[in-house]
Amino acid sequence: NAGVTQTPKFQVLKTGQSMTLQCAQDMNHEYMSWYRQDPGMGLRLIHYSVGAGITDQGEVPNGYNVSRSTTEDFPLRLLSAAPSQTSVYFCASRGGGNQPQHFGDGTRLSIL
Amino acid sequence: AQSVTQLDSQVPVFEEAPVELRCNYSSSVSVYLFWYVQYPNQGLQLLLKYLSGSTLVESINGFEAEFNKSQTSFHLRKPSVHISDTAEYFCAVRTNAGGTSYGKLTFGQGTILTVHP
């Protein structure tokens, strides 16, 4: 069972570059989310989706875009990378009702 | 809005000692409660969850947590820790949202548990 798959696992970017973090799940989950993890701050919600074609902003959405064209995929785009976006990014998915979230292994992103 | 406070950022203990990791939450509606564990350089794994029913929930590796509605707490306990329990632990709360509402998951700041030999 693949679960939630994130690519790449590591990435180094220069300030101003753009890139897309990929997330795919094979559990037919309706809900998908992107979080960033920074030391001492837990995980903070960037964007989320309640189904294909539906996305909304979370707690820290600035500088990031998302789209959900299929149930399986939920890519996160950095439009113009900034050093403040250096972080570990986690994608998560869950089914409806009281189902818990399943997390990917994360993408470690460094912006120079 | 909901929030989660983990009262200790770091908890050092010796092997075979008991441990309690504290978590308090605030929410104006009913919630689901979770504990996740993150081992070094890995993603988050669900440790245990409270959805409804019995207020005491247990994991397969000896951890337990008790939902206390009056104190809005969900503390994590283990009577005897092992070296392998060294990890960061996150408490999280999600509103018991119905229909197509997202039910945002809010995390605490995390507690680093370090078990010493």
Image (cartoon, coloured by chain):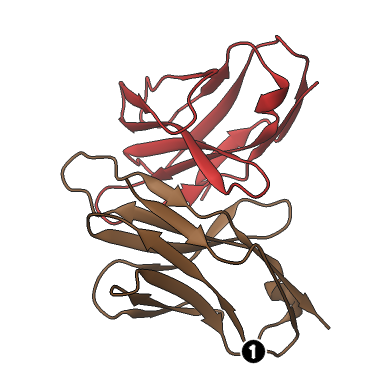
Chain colours: A red, B brown
Q: Which residue is mark 1?
A: B80
Q: Residue furthest left?
A: B99
In which quadrant of the rendered view does residue B45 lie?
bottom right
Residue sitting at x 28%, y 56%: A98
Residue sitting at x 64%, y 89%: B80
Residue sitting at x 44%, y 36%: A33
Type of the residue with mark 1: Ser
| Crowd around label 1: few <14 · some 14–19 · many ≥20 (10 Å) | few
Residue B72 visible here = yes
Q: Position of residue A95 (x, y in %)?
A: 32, 47
Residue sitting at x 81%, y 20%: A112
Q: Position of residue B8 (x, y in %)?
A: 61, 66
Chain bearing tag 1 is: B
Is B29 left or right of B13, judged from the image as shown?
A: left
In which quadrant of the rendered view does residue A11 lie?
top right
Q: Position of residue B72 (x, y in %)?
A: 35, 69
Along the viewing direction, whichever of B46 and A26 lies nearer the viewer = B46
In which quadrant of the rendered view does residue B102 lie?
top left
Residue B63 visible here = no
Is B80 left or right of B116, judged from the image as shown?
A: left
Q: Is residue A73 above or below residue B100?
A: above
